Amino acid sequence: MKISQFYLLAALLISFNTSNTVNAQEPYNILWLSCEDIGPIMGAYGTKHIKTPNIDRLAQEGVLFEKAYATVGVCAPSRASIITGMYPINIGTHNMRTGNHWGYHSPEEEAYETAIKVKDKTGRNVPQYSVVPPSFVRCFSEYMREAGYYCTNNAKCDYQFNCPISAWDEVGNNAHYQHRKPNQPFFAVFNHGITHESQIWKQQKEPITVDTAQIQIPQYFADIPLVRRDVGRKYSNIEQLDQQIGEWLQKLEDENLLDKTIIFFWSDHGGPLLRQKRAVGNSGLHVPLIVRFPDKRMAGKRVDDIVSLMDLGPTVMSLAGLKPPIHMHGKAFLGPYKTSKSHQYAFGSADRFDEHTEMSRSVIDGRFVYIRNYIMDQPYTYPLFYREQIEMTKALIKLNKKGLLKGEAAYIFQASKPYEELYDLQNDPDEVHNLIHNSKHQTKLKELRTALSEWQLKMHDKGFIPEHDLVNLMWPNGTQPKTAQVELTDSKNTISLSSPTEGASIVYQLNDSIGSDHWRLYVHPIKLKKGKLVARAVRIGYQTSDIISIQY
């Protein structure tokens, strides 16, 4: 053997052994610390007069994403895109909200009201329903379960469909990674509600921990004491969130898990106040996103690429060594399957919000925001009961009716919506100066207008389908479809399970676990020499199948 060949072979052997050693290492746990209704309002993102030392620590020890966006500026459609990795307008999860899906309900508890005083664009009734996406769509957590991760969600679901029993090992207020088997890696979600819109009024009597005279008030709000108080409440709630994140960091250290766990911190969409939550522009879609690795790799790095919250699932899969399915619109932004081409644009949508019918679409390139409004004969700030429980919102509405709002503070109270909007975030971060007719920006306007149209065509934008008709497409004749019963074949005490329903997942229980809330995800044929097995089939949006059982 020639010397050069010898060294080449030696190098290959070393590479092979090193690769095996790496693969043999215990996989990292993955923890999501999610929150609700905040834009990037914290020290790490440059916000002044707010104290967020724990979130800032995550950024210093991790990777901060400057341009992270939700797909929708409200929780349920946004969370649908996160759990599926898909755009809501493509899979029909774009209307807020379709049913009582906030928390987990067992298949037997799943129920829908037929009359909820909601009308679609044509004035027809919209009942509660569970969205039925295409058969290939699954909750990405199922892929993690298949790979051996113990997957828990505490506690919010809100996916626009009843949370499938196949999605999590545990889901609910008691769900916790501590219940996993020894040395089993976990993927765990803990949601923090302190920053939710409702906490602006529910926390009203709690101390405000920031100096309201110093905080920045967006130009689209009148700078009055009540506004400063409620914006101060928003900031104070974020400071409470930061304390909760600090408690998590301490807990992980105490459990010797901080150096074994990848931490994601993110919010489901933008801020809780008027022209933030539900908005289709930057104020409604721009979110904080920070990822901390156990070995602090890339510590302090700030990433300028556009990322979407629907990229979270593919990224978690990539970090677990799993290749994301090709049907997902989301792209992995970390791990071995990190995309070689990040998103050129962030796309957003706004449709029905509770009792109000809406339809707008947006595209953001990181600096410019283009918005296309499809229902223009309504006020820019439309009536909506839920958000009008915030005192500053009611006060601003009254001031507008009296004609007392001027300049930028009057902008969001226009009597009707413009056909198109274009904003330059670099020079107009509060999006109050519409450049749609500005001759200097016509090239950018045409670029973003074209990008948005092409995206809508590619996504087969279901917002053009009246919701009454959309429900009947998913539930023929208004009846929820049902997953077919599991079919079982037995060969030499090896049981194989299947379902005739396309896209169905199968779960099962054995012996003493039968009747519990925990269902195992069926991946491979099961060897069963003695005992009892029960199984059922699950497809998103369908009724879960009846239980079948076999006794040995």
Image (spheres, rainbow, N blue to C red):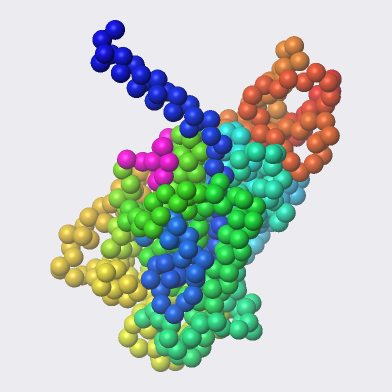
**Residue in the picture at 55% in, 82% down:** 209
Nearer the observer, 203 or 46: 46
In the picture, residue 306 is in which quadrant?
Answer: bottom left
Q: Which residues are magenta?
A: 326-340
Find residue 474 and report its horizontal and vertical position in percent: 56, 43
> In this rendering, is residue 390 above or below 360?
below
In this picture, is 313 found above or below 233?
A: above
Location of the N terminus by quadrant is top left
Residue 164, position as x, y percentages in the image = 65, 43
Q: Main secondary structure of the magenta part?
A: loop
Q: Which residue is painted at 41% across and 77% down in the image?
A: 48
- Residue 369 placement, left or right of 182: left
The relative height of residue 105 versus residue 204 in the rendered view (above or below) is above
Q: Is residue 337 magenta?
A: yes
Q: Taking 206 as reference, is 88 left or right?
A: left
Residue located at (43% from left, 41% from top): 335
